[in-house]
Amino acid sequence: LAKTTQPISMDSYEGQEVNITCSHNNIATNDYITWYQQFPSQGPRFIIQGYKTKVTNEVASLFIPADRKSSTLSLPRVSLSDTAVYYCLAQGAQKLVFGQGTRLTINP
Amino acid sequence: NAGVTQTPKFQVLKTGQSMTLQCAQDMNHEYMSWYRQDPGMGLRLIHYSVGAGITDQGEVPNGYNVSRSTTEDFPLRLLSAAPSQTSVYFCASSPRDRGLDTQYFGPGTRLTVL
């Protein structure tokens, strides 16, 4: 399983675009990059997944460079409700291993 | 659909007691998993199942048993509770074609062992 590294915490303001970068230097050929969001006292929620280039859905965008050694989750125009912990995972569809995640705080 | 449901929401046990945490899903998902989350930490995989009758160990399986007799249910048994098992437990499921890296999580069970 590829080890991922992401910032422990980030702060931003309402209406801003937030980019959270994750490094996964040892990602394997079959591994996908997946991001989850977790609010306090709730289970994680799947946000987005990608293999390479760019993926966009109604919630976020995921940018993956050609070497796939890193990825960036982009949250457009954040609001206070985006305050949560965000987990980056880079692994195959066998076992799910979560790191400590990035605690994102959105300020008014 | 109710999605993934877990019972109970809260539980207090004494050291040495046993209990079963219940997990059910109504989405006909083949894959189900159990995780524990300690304060300020990420989730750690306890056990998982890729289908009825099939289970396997995760990262921290000691002290826990599972079985998967139906597609819908995946109970987690604590054999002899210890204070180190105080944690929040999450159950998750995913369809076979999405794999274990895209899962739907339940609301969690907060367990305290005294």
Image: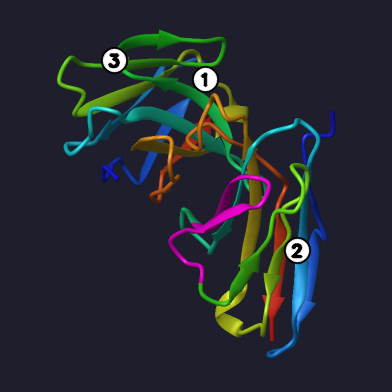
Question: Which of the numbered marks, if any, corresponds to residue B21?
Answer: 2
Q: Nearer the viewer, mark 2 or mark 1?
A: 2
Please state the extent of the stretch shown in magenta in the rendering. Answer: B45-61
**Which quadrant of the figure has residue B2?**
top right
| Residue B88 appears in view | yes
In terms of secondary structure, where does tag 3 sit? Answer: loop
> Does A42 appear in magenta?
no
Vertical placement of residue B1 versus B82, above or below: above
- Residue B5 position, x and y percent, is 79, 45
Label 2 element class: strand
Q: Residues within 10 Å of mark 1 (few under 14, many from 20)?
A: some
Residue A37: where, in percent of width, then height?
Answer: 53, 35
Three-letter amino acid code of the residue under disc 2: Leu
Amino acid type of the residue tagged 1 in the rendering = Val
Characterize the magenta stretch by its predominant secondary structure. strand
At 56% from the left and 52% from the top, the residue drawn is B48
Say whether residue A38 is left or right of residue A98. right
